[in-house]
Image (spheres, rainbow, N blue to C red):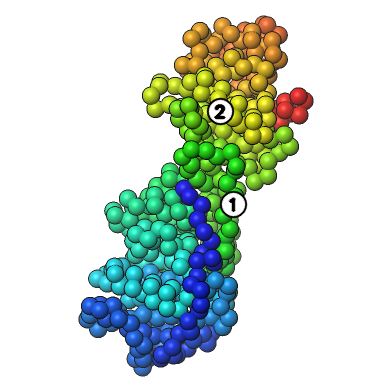
Amino acid sequence: MMLGTPALLLAAEAYGPFEGEKSAWHDGFDRYDYVMDEATLAIRPFKAPEGERFGVRDPEKGQRRCLVIVPKQAAPGNPWSWRGCYWDHQPQTEVELLRRGFHIAYISANATLRPGREWDAWYAFLTEQHGLSRKPAFIGMSRGGEYSYTWATAHPQQVSCIYADNPGGNREMLTRLGDLATNDVPLLHVVGSIDPLLGRFSSTIENIYQQYGGRISVMMKDGAAHHPHSLHDPTPIADFIEQSVRATPSAAPDYLAGRITHTSFYSTENYYRDFPKEGTDITCRGAIFSACYDRYSFELAGVEGAITVTIPKMPAPGKPWVFRSEFVGRDAVVDLALLARGFHIVTGPVSYNMDGPSLAHWNAAYQYLVAHGFSPKPVLEGAGRAAGDAYAWSVENPDKVSCIYAENPVLRSFMSKTPLIDRLNVLAGAKVPLLHVCGSLDPAFTTQTGEVKRRYEGIGGSIRVIVQEGQGHYPLAPRDPNPVVDFITGTIASK
């Protein structure tokens, strides 16, 4: 994912005032109506018919109705939101955005009037002729959510964010979500827990976007169906849109090299919260409800496989870090807690051409990071067979390890030609403390952790085992990360 340019910096050089037929929209905001010829894409002022009030009727055949609502005082950069469908339905978010200086725009859309070149022409009219930001925020409800995603995935560099409410979808836009993630477009879904479209589209979008490393947040109204859309109090939605538009990309670390990929890492833990104005509780999760961290993958010359670094908000003194071989999932509670404490989380390189990590390539990654200020004694961590990689690197570099933390470990690794369990004396001699978190029903518990404990204590090593009763090999993470985090931070502090 590439770091994008803030939407506020992508406005045209000069703002062009809107002209033509003017009327009033909610709270006295100026409304300008236009009509577009579908054949020529020409746009001209249009007088809204009597009785239309705040809404808009379907256009005559061959035309598209277009609307712009103008704020009392435009915010810097001329930000705007684009309604994907169902104009004036639950408009409270747009009214709030108008108060914050956003313009609001719409072009006719219904079951037969879908996004196409008409939308492109409307976008050009607003940005090139009137100086609005080149990265609008999208608001889409139901079919409007589908249409917002349809246009946005076709123009991923021209979108600041998307708020989709019980969105619909289609196969094509689902296959193109990665382009939005690459351009770091944040998403917010407000959905009902019993909406018939939830599993088909909103949850599918959420899962795909997370896998691509994109930022998506969800507010799920308990017991709500497809209607009503939006929130009675639109503040959380308007805050999301305004903050997304104004966000300034963070600076990339100076040690990145080769082919660089940027994604976001955050917990998907659910938070069940009371929203009195909504008359129900709302389950909140995702990037705006949890700490969200930058994650970079990069390559080094002579090293096969990418190195992935997840960066804390504020690095702890000494720049402590975790060195591990497997992908860090969003349920990695220990790593999330360590990030909050200022640790970097590093996934070492694994080649596509080998059955496991290379000791030489891990050594090169270690040397490179230490040369760029990382602590010379990382925490080695792994779960399952990947814990074997942590042990394998440690026994070859015992003086470079602060401690080893393993979840349901299996001590095997392609980095070691001899059984790792026979080399524990190297770690004991370097006084490397060990911590295992294991399920009592894990099939490997006795032959692996039980045997490591017996041997390590027998040669004077320090090992602690936390047994989670009634659990098997999965889940790997501990129920409570605090004892693990205390062990790791205490070990580093003592050294």
Of pointers 1 and 2, the one earlier in the residue sequence: 1
Q: Residues within 10 Å of mark 1 (few under 14, many from 20)?
A: few
Name the spot of residue 346 as percent of width and height, x first: 56, 33
User: Which residue sits at x=38%, y=24%?
Assistant: 353
Quadrant (top left/top right/bottom left/bottom right) for the C terminus:
top right
Name the spot of residue 425 as percent of width and height, x first: 64, 8
Instruction: Determine which quarter of the picture holds residue 451.
Output: top right
Q: Is residue 431 visible from the viewing direction of this image?
A: yes
Residue that badge 1 annotates = 250
Q: Is residue 296 above or below residue 364?
A: below
- Disc 2 marks a residue whose amino acid type is Ala
Q: Tell me the distance, in whole angstroms, between the alpha carbons under discs 1 and 2.
A: 24 Å
- Secondary structure beneath label 1: loop
User: Which residue sits at x=51%, y=77%?
Assistant: 14
- Secondary structure beneath label 2: helix
Most extreme residue toward the front is 301
Most extreme residue toward the right is 494
Name the spot of residue 21 as percent of width and height, x first: 41, 91
Instruction: Determine which quarter of the picture holds residue 345.
Output: top right
Q: Residues within 10 Å of mark 2 (few under 14, many from 20)?
A: many
Left or right relative to 430: residue 215: left
Name the spot of residue 228 as percent of width and height, x first: 43, 68
- Disc 1 marks a residue whose amino acid type is Ser
Q: Is residue 92 visible from the viewing direction of this image?
A: no
Q: Nearer the viewer, residue 25 or 5?
A: 5
Residue that badge 2 annotates = 365
Instruction: Determine which quarter of the picture holds residue 335.
Output: top right
